[in-house]
Amino acid sequence: MSKTIVIDGKVIPFEDGQTIIQAATAAGVYIPHLCHNPKFTPHGSCKLCTVKVNGRNCSACTFPASEGQNITNISEELNDDREKITQMLFVEGNHFCPSCEKTGNCNLQAVAYHLGMTDNHFPHFFENREVDASHPDVMIDHNRCIFCTLCVRASQQEDGKNVFAISGRGIEKRLVVNSPSGLLRDSDLDVNDCAAHICPTGAILIKRTGYNVPIGQRIFDHAHIDTVALAAEGASHDE
Amino acid sequence: MQNFIKNLAQENDFQATRLLKILRGVQTKYLHIPKDAIEQLAELLNIPRTQIQNVVEFYSFFHLQPRGQYDILISSSITDLMVGQEELVNYFAEKLGLKIGEVRADGVVSLNNTSCTGMCDQSLAGLVNGYAITKLTKSRIDEIVENVNKQLPLEQWSRDLFDVQDNIIKSDLLLNQKPTQGEAINATFARGLMETLNEVEKSGLRGRGGAGYTTAWKWKFCHEENAIQRYIVCNADEGEPGTFKDRVLLNSYADSVFEGMTVAAAIIGATQGFIYLRGEYLHLYEKLEGILQARRNANLLGKNILQHGFDFDIEICLGAGAYICGEESALIESLEGKAGIPRNRPPYPVVSGYLNKPTSVNNVETFLAAANIAIHGGEWFANLGTAKSKGTKILSISGDCAKAGIYEYPFGTTIQTILNDCGASDVLGVQVGGPSGTFIANDEFERKIAFEDLATGGSFIVFNNSRNILDIVHNFSHFFAHESCGFCTPCRVGTSLLKKQVDKIVEGHGSAGDIVALEELCQLIKNYSHCGLGQTAANPVLTTLERYPELYQSMLKKISYEPGFDLDKSLETARRMAHRDDAHAHLAQVED
Ligand SMILES: Cc1cc2nc3c(=O)[nH]c(=O)nc-3n(C[C@H](O)[C@H](O)[C@H](O)COP(=O)(O)O)c2cc1C
Ligand code: SF4
Ligand code: SF4
Ligand code: FES
Ligand code: FES
């Protein structure tokens, strides 16, 4: 007998050591998420993956699955609150999707659509953030960084480097580059690094490729993020 | 500089865990952390430069740009505001000839505000180069300005400026004890380690840092973990505005606190302990080092303590201005030389704490209680208190009362009794447990100090009827936004949004929908934040909105919608560029 948890009434098997999101993904259940990527150690910071475990809010990407958990993933309350958390990310940065190269391939945008977000709800911060275009092949547009640390983790865990880090406290947080000048040009980032391609938003972009795939033919133009995520991440769980 | 940094790193055995201590040395010497120092330290400690950069940017007491030779910080806690903080700081700035937040052009002095420095019983308080100054008045400010302008070395300033009083006003079970050195250690070994753990369990002692977890269980779990190395940590971060009892315990009961740590270490099987002392208590550092050394000399620390075949020592680690480092897993990160960002749980620190080894983090007062329980037994303690809250609680009382200071009460004591004792009259309400706690109104004074009613880490701030509740909420909301570590979205973005929303209402720009929006935002921050900071950051609004809804309503304009940004203000740049200031260059917020 394998051990099981229950998500929205559905019985789902899990193995010891699995997080709730890992068990869910393997069983074809989508839990909205942004800072989680099954390839890397979980971070637990965006809070989009919050589910109710026996009535208590937990981050599905970090919380271990265990016998007896009765989990709510889909409810009006959770959906509304996830939408508001997403709106927080939108107003914190400067996301002008129509003029963003990533539009249609952007997880932040796709999650927002998935949650039915139609406006930003909160007042904008309109923070002045910079663009680092110093690297020959890769650029950073800090306006779109949501501090998910996926690039940080990818660089450390996949590329064996340490190109990115998050620095500062509170609302002053920012992405920094590990180079003497602080510029991407002077770091050891290579265009083929996983870290250059992992960003869920349009904050790290590969130069000269932005419109290779025309708008209308992009990932989320034809599929919802739940299907896309389950296909991609379900597969990588089995690796 | 190269040699200085190299020596500093060497003195700290090139250990990255000592990064905060090293940076403190650099900051003191160069008044900031120069870029070259970061580069050199990255090499010497073998860590990425970005880790050092992050630490410098995370902690309020490290700076990338030079501060003045005299760096003056003034506490901006609500109790400071109540003695006229704003006026006095402005006076200070004017006399020094600088703007708040800035360094004077000659580089001699800088002035800024800071979060509560733990001196609410002797406000207005502040720090000069990290050392506490108290009871600031215009004449004391004049004296400081003169010292600064003469560039008088700190050692030659009048000692009176640095005078920190204990103000112990009411002692009970714990504060009345004056055990001899080694008494608790000997009693523990005489009775047996597990027998002593049983006594701690029997005492019903629950953590005094706020969360109230049963101390004996924490020690038991830590002890039962399979590990070669375990750690015991004393949480002396005491950052909750209005709390200052740990400062007094460390000033006058340090031996007992260290003894409590030693007893705990013997029980769980730790050989190394740390005391995480908030940077604001730098004035206690040397004294505590001295006491630790005396204890080593008396074989109360070190190898084979009092011939019981047990080794243990304690190291003091100073914080650097970050309230979040009071949260136990953030504290552990800080001990490891990193930014104080709370970890994901599980695993809990008792399983995987400092350097991923089982670690028990306990409050200063918890250790003091444990030392005395080791001597007198569990029943002695459990005889006082209520069903779920045994023993006594040491309170830090400040605000509108005749006698601010330290009061020890059996759990179950009513708010009214406490108010009578401290000489409070015409009371509007009391903030129990600090900004993260509860605001109670004057029809609730029969409520009790107890985990099952009003839980508190010790902060107790009294407000009389001359005070405005919204000023209090305003101050607390700014505190949380400033102290959020920024790790998780709901707290990082939410506390800043909350600050803006409170400002909007307090400044009279709120309209009908804004109270609903305010409450909705509060629930979001409370329910989705990663750690206790975010989960309690909305309490000031929630607890006052519940009690004084009409007060919030009265601040609203009689229109249905007011935009979040100031229309007219946002045209300022355009006006400046067009050199215009006529009526047509201004916009009203709403059409008349
Ligand atoms: C934001 C935050 C700040 C805290 N600050 C302190 C503190 O200054 N001192 C303290 O003892 N506990 C503090 N705590 C509680 C600690 O996380 C921890 O529960 C406590 O140190 C455990 O000791 P105890 O069991 O003796 O209470 C804080 C918690 C949070 C969430
Ligand atoms: S740059 Fe992208 S991947 Fe990196 S932290 Fe920001 S949003 Fe995440
Ligand atoms: S709740 Fe606030 S302080 Fe706690 S982890 Fe989240 S951002 Fe940091
Ligand atoms: S996906 Fe779980 S917190 Fe971000
Ligand atoms: S579309 Fe550009 S950040 Fe999402």
Image (cartoon, coloured by chain):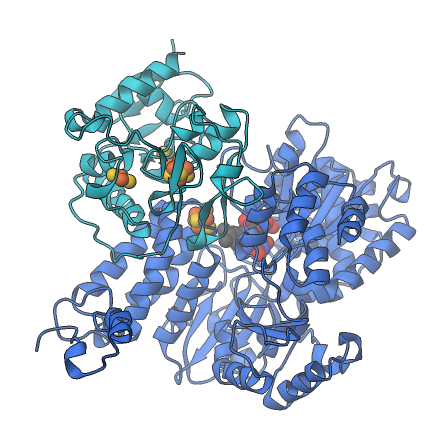
Instruction: Say which quarter of the image contains residue A108.
Output: top left
Q: Nearer the viewer, residue A75 or B14?
A: B14
The colour assigned to chain A within the rendered structure: cyan
Residue A20 at what x, y percent from top left?
A: 37, 26
Q: Is residue B491 left or right of residue B129?
A: left
Residue A143 visible in the displayed image = yes
Residue B209 visible in the displayed image = no
Residue at x 23% of width, y 71% of height: B571
Residue B269 at what x, y percent from top left?
A: 74, 35
Instruction: Say which quarter of the image contains residue A160.
Output: top right
In this view, the residue farthest toward the bottom is B139
Residue at x 50% of width, y 33% of height: B346
Residue B516 at what x, y percent from top left?
A: 21, 60
Q: Which chain is blue?
A: B
Q: Quadrant of the C terminus of chain B?
A: bottom left
Question: In the image, is residue A75 above or below residue B29?
Answer: above
Q: Quadrant of the N terminus of chain B?
A: bottom right
Residue B334 at what x, y percent from top left?
A: 61, 47
Q: Is residue B336 left or right of residue B193?
A: left
In this view, the residue farthest toward the top is A1
Question: In the image, is residue B539 above or below residue A186?
Answer: below
Q: Nearer the viewer, residue B562 or B280?
A: B562
Count up the numbered dots.
0
Instruction: Say which quarter of the image contains residue A235.
Output: top left
Residue at x 61% of width, y 58% of height: B62
Question: In the image, is residue B360 above or below residue A67?
Answer: below
Q: Is residue A29 left or right of residue A64?
A: left
Residue at x 35% of width, y 26% of height: A21
